[in-house]
Image (tube, rainbow, N blue to C red):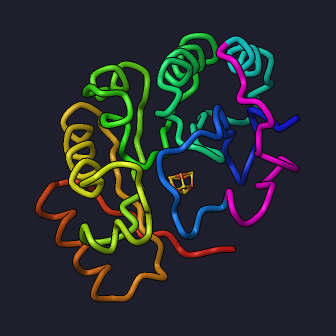
Amino acid sequence: MADILYTYKNSVYANITNKCNCRCTFCIRFQKDGVGSSDTLWHQVNPTKEEVLNAIRNYDFTGFDELVFCGYGEPTCELDILLEAARTAKEEKSLKTRLNTNGLGNEQNGRDIVPELAKVIDSVSISLNAPDPVKYQEVTRPQYDNGFEKMIDFATRCRKKIKDVKWSIVDVLPEEDIEKCRQLSESTGVELKIRHFSK
Ligand code: SF4
């Protein structure tokens, strides 16, 4: 049985679903089973809302102040669970909440979900992955057309409603792509975080 909650470095992470609407070439789902304190993050059966809420309620968060929604899938593919779990983490455990996302949640759910996220999520980290639509498509392989534009739109909507919003890229990108990502960040006002690649 895969863990719903696991620790990695200084944070507690929630792995609420394996569902995803992308097939990123680098996805950890296709490379290894476990991360941090979890031996496997691959759910045989995706957890129910009750199982996720119970996992949060029963977890000892001593020493941790933030719950990060992330894992082996895309949390916005289970929006109802995500929203309820984040609300529970804030209201019952006094935790900050962060969402790591591919930024395609509006498309996935057929509406602008940002106002709902803004009520229960304190910070959002969106995978930018590539500086333009062609490269984004190649790397991320989303189920939707125009995924790059949709991800950009999601990020700019988040920036207007949520205080801490960042795009993340990994420093394995060529310098000219990193520079284009910087320009995108400047033109949209969405902060860019360049993470060091680690296996
Ligand atoms: S969006 Fe995340 S979970 Fe989905 S395929 Fe890409 S890296 Fe994997």
Q: Nearer the viewer, residue 121 or 1?
A: 1
Q: Verify whether residue 46 appears in magenta.
A: yes
Residue at position x 65%, y 47% in the image = 72
Residue 92 point in image, percent of width and height: 62, 11
Quadrant where the C terminus sits is: bottom right
**Magenta-colored segment: predominant secondary structure:** loop
Q: Nearer the viewer, residue 33 or 138?
A: 138
Image vertical order of residue 112 relative to residue 167, above or below? above
Hey, which quadrant is residue 30 in on the image? bottom right
Can you tell me which quadrant of the image ligand 1 is in? Answer: bottom right
Instruction: Please give the range of residues in magenta.
Output: 29-49
Hey, which quadrant is residue 140 in on the image? bottom left
Residue at position x 71%, y 54% in the image = 9
Quadrant where the N terminus sits is: top right
Hey, which quadrant is residue 123 in on the image? top left
Residue 158 point in image, percent of width and height: 27, 38
Residue at the extreme left of the image, as rendered: 187
Q: Is residue 182 left or right of residue 49?
A: left
Residue 44 point in image, percent of width and height: 80, 36
